Amino acid sequence: MSSKKIRILYIDDERHNLYAFRAAFRIDFEILLAESAEEAREILKEKEVPIIIADQRMPRETGIEFFESIKDQYPYTMRILLTGYTDIQAVISAVNVGNIFRYLQKPWNEEEIKAAVQSAFEVYDSRVQLIEKQKELEKAYGELDKFVYSASHDLRSPLMSILGIIKLARIEQDHNSTEQYFSMIEESVLRLDEFIKNIISYYKNNRIENEITSIDLKALSEEIIDANRYQELAKSIQFELDVQQTVAFRSDILKLKIIFSNLVSNAIKYQSPNKSDKKLWIHIQVNRDGARIEIGDNGIGIALTEQENIFKMFFRATNHNFGSGIGLYIVKDAVSRLNGKIYVDSEVGRGTIFRIDLPNIS
């Protein structure tokens, strides 16, 4: 359970009861007060409230009526009813209609209230965690479906191409075409290799917890550039590196390598073949709060209509060259796991810039 105080909304039309409740429980809990159901609804619009305690006897709207009115909008909030009289019908109605968690009599007992709140919050916390797990499971199922669909293409398609080329070479038996066939096979193997590397990166990003260390972002950038500089497509690209780092920057170096590698690789792959002044740059500014990272190129760019989808799994904005459609999804996921934000600025024919804001993790 979190060490943060449990937030309670207490509703009672008698002001002295409100003040007495706050005085009794303000040390143990965070107390919000409302003199009416209308005032309570306004509070619920502004703040997340795990537990509501309401008096049954209120002039315009009873506690049961209030709970019934909010149960669909706030289904996970725990509801506790207070009443100053014994009425079994009110209890039955509260349970059946208002879906209350507990029913307590007035005058209330402090220890009983504390015990009820603790029990209610444990249920609330369990429900919230269950919802989060369910969302994660739904996301995992969705990703699995996409993976199976994509694997049938991105894994099998290059292999089928290779087999087709081999059969063609055997039929023709033309030694003059050997180099062409080797080039075609190499392209298919590279497509397959890229897909496998991205799947490995995705696995590492999801399964390995953050390991926070001090990072020299200039050295990291140089490492990534050197690893990509001698690709066939990178030979005519002018690389530019500008890192302004005078303070320590702490983050997870594995996730940063995943981010930098994917963005630099994309910037190389999606250069415009007709441009003579191909450029790729990495600009980084670091301060005590974090780092602003900019990785850009003057390549083919991304259409505005496609930009909102580029971080989705297996989405391809273009058929230019080859791509697995998972790289930018992994980048976005890695940035999120480092509590950062990523933005894209792109125009067709002019290039693409990715800007990333990452916190300095202590």
Image (spheres, grey):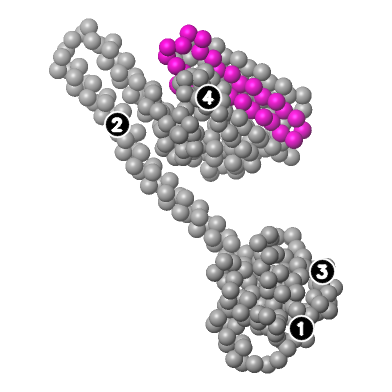
Residue 320 is situated, as x and y percent measured from the top left of the image, at 39, 23
Q: CA distance from mark 1 to mark 3?
A: 16 Å
Q: Earlier in the sequence, mark 1 or mark 3?
A: 3
Residue 21 is situated, as x and y percent measured from the top left of the image, at 80, 76
Residue nearest the observer in this picture, 280 or 87? 87
> Label 2, on which residue?
157
Is disc 2 surrounded by few (<14), some (14 to 19) or many (20+) residues within 10 Å? some
Q: Quadrant of residue 216?
A: top right
Q: Earlier in the sequence, mark 4 or mark 1?
A: 1
176 with respect to 31 (left or right): left
> Label 4, on which residue?
352
Residue occupying the far front of the picture: 60
Residue 146 is situated, as x and y percent measured from the top left of the image, at 38, 44
Please tell me whether residue 270 belongs to the stretch shown in magenta.
yes
Question: Could one spot residue 223 in this view of the protein?
Answer: no
SS at circle 1: loop
Is there a contact, CB below 8 Å, between mark 4 and mark 1? Answer: no
SS at circle 3: loop
Q: Quadrant of residue 74?
A: bottom right
> Label 1, on which residue?
108
Question: Could one spot residue 242 in this view of the protein?
Answer: yes
Q: CA distance from mark 4 to mark 2?
A: 29 Å
Q: CA distance from mark 2 to mark 1?
A: 71 Å
The stretch of residues the image draws in magenta is 267-295
> Label 3, on which residue?
26
Is disc 3 surrounded by few (<14), some (14 to 19) or many (20+) residues within 10 Å? some
Q: Earlier in the sequence, mark 4 or mark 2?
A: 2
Which residue shows up at 57% across the image and 66% down it? 73
Q: Amino acid at mark 4?
A: Thr
Q: CA distance from mark 2 to mark 3?
A: 65 Å
Tell me if residue 143 comes above or below residue 288 in the rendering: below
